Each structure stands twice: as C-alpha cells, then as structure tokens.
Image (cartoon, rainbow, N blue to C red):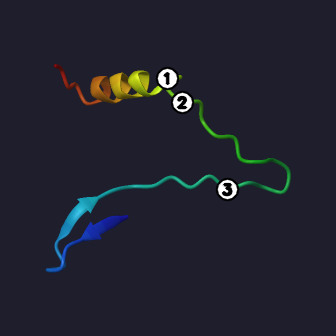
Amino acid sequence: MRCENQRGEVTTPGTAVVLLPTREHAVELPAPPAPDLPGMVAHELARFSVTD
C-alpha cells in the first residue's frame, strides 16, 4: 500500500495484513495491546522508542 502525491512521488509507504476466514474457521482478530486509548498510545510510543 502507498500514497502518491500529484508528482507521482510515494509519500506514505505502508503494509497491510489481511485475515481471511476458511470454511472451517472464522477470522480470529489479535488481542489489542492495551484496553484503552492512553494504553494504546503508550504502547506505540514504546514500540518506536519515543520518550517525552
């Protein structure tokens, strides 16, 4: 996945994961790393080694 500007330059590269069901099993979504938004933000900041 990516976004391009009007000049055709890639400005936002990205990746995606697609979870598909099978005939035998439904899709099982992964558990979130935190139960609330502040916890999610803290998780992402730690993941990218961002400090205050």
Q: Which mark is residue 32?
A: 2
Q: Which mark is residue 3?
A: none
Of circles 3 and 2, which is in front?
Answer: 2
Q: Quadrant of the C terminus?
A: top left
28 left or right, relative to 43: right
Residue at left offset 73%, top offset 54%: 21
11 left or right, relative to 33: left
Residue at left offset 81%, top offset 47%: 25
Crowding at mark 2 (Cα within 10 Å: few <14, some 14-19, many 20+) = few
Whole-percent x, y for residue 34 in the image: 49, 23
Q: Secondary structure at mark 2?
A: loop
Dot 3 or dot 2: first in sequence order is 3
Residue at left offset 28%, top offset 27%: 45
Whole-percent x, y for residue 29 in the image: 64, 40
Q: Which mark is residue 20?
A: 3
Dot 1 or dot 3: first in sequence order is 3
Seen in the picture, residue 31 relative to 4 is either above or below; the reply is above
Do tag 1 and tag 2 residues touch (Cβ < 8 Å)? yes
Q: What is the three-letter code of the residue carrying label 3?
A: Leu
Q: What is the three-letter code of the residue carrying label 1?
A: Ala
Residue at left offset 18%, top offset 20%: 51
Q: What is the three-letter code of the residue carrying label 2?
A: Pro
10 left or right, relative to 29: left
Do tag 1 and tag 3 residues touch (Cβ < 8 Å)? no
Q: Which residue is mark 1?
A: 34
Seen in the picture, residue 37 relative to 13 is either above or below; the reply is above
Of circles 1 and 3, which is in front?
Answer: 1
**Real-space Cα distance between discs 1 and 3?**
24 Å
**Real-space Cα distance between discs 1 and 2?**
5 Å
Seen in the picture, residue 49 relative to 18 is either above or below; the reply is above
Q: Secondary structure at mark 3?
A: loop
